[in-house]
Image (tube, grey):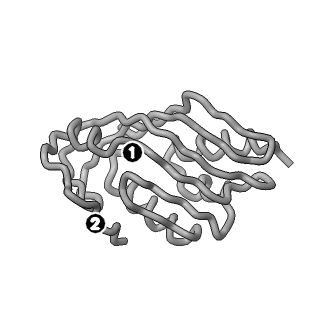
Amino acid sequence: MSSNEDQLRGYFHAYQHGDVDASLEYMTDDVVYIDHAMGFRATNKTYLRRAWNRYFEVASNDDHSSEVHSLHLTPTGEYFVEWTERNRLDRDWAFLRATGTPYAVRGVSIGLIKDGLIVHNADYYDLTSILRQSGIDEVPKSIPTLEL
């Protein structure tokens, strides 16, 4: 079996290429995935697949890219990954209006991987940076629930 580090790198590689199914192969069926900026929490792969498929439907596949800057993994499986994602929204996504303007956001993922599968992942990034780069001046006072 591949090491946890190889598996993490495989997951981020699949996500970088917008391959939802391949990304999810690196997760347990009952993965807990949290996107703190969007106020989103999934507690299984089925729900996460729906969310990511919707995201990649509204985002520009031509402009999507992400880069891993650093990856740190403890012997017990806790990890910290620093990344940058670049994209643009061609259609509305959750409470974000589509402007077609490219954005880049730097963020971190913190999680736990066991036996080569991600059990828990939490993403943190600056949502207001995406809004401003996209030309959206009004920042929501609260984050509505992500409807799928």
Kind of residue sitting beneath label 2: Pro
The answer to which quarter of the image holds residue 57 is bottom left
Residue 116: x, y in percent?
77, 52
What residue do we see at 13% from left, 49% from top?
138
| Image-based side of 35 in relation to 113, left or right | left
- Residue 37 relative to residue 117: left or right: left
Q: Where residue 63 sits in the image (x, y, percent)?
A: 36, 37
Residue beneath disc 1:
61
Check residue 144 in the rendering and tell me which mark sits there, or answer none.
Answer: 2
Marks 1, 2: nearer the viewer: 2
Secondary element at image label 2: loop
Q: Residue at x 63, y 33 (%)?
A: 71
- Is residue 32 positioned above or below 74 on the image? below
User: Of residues 141 and 69, which is closer to you in this image?
Assistant: 141
| The residue positioned farthest toward the front in the image shown | 141
Q: Tag 1: residue type?
A: Asn
First in residue order: circle 1 vs circle 2: 1
Q: Quadrant of residue 136?
A: top left
Q: Position of residue 82 (x, y in %)?
A: 53, 34
Secondary-structure class at tag 1: loop
Left or right of residue 140: residue 119: right
- Label 1 Cα neighbours within 10 Å, binned few <14 / some 14-19 / many ≥20: some
Residue 117 in the image: x percent, y percent? 72, 56
Residue in view at x 54 percent, y 60 percent: 33
Q: Is residue 21 left or right of residue 36?
A: right
Residue visible at 67% across and 59% down? 119
Q: CA distance from mark 1 to mark 2?
A: 25 Å
Circle 2 residues within 10 Å: few <14, some 14–19, many ≥20:
few
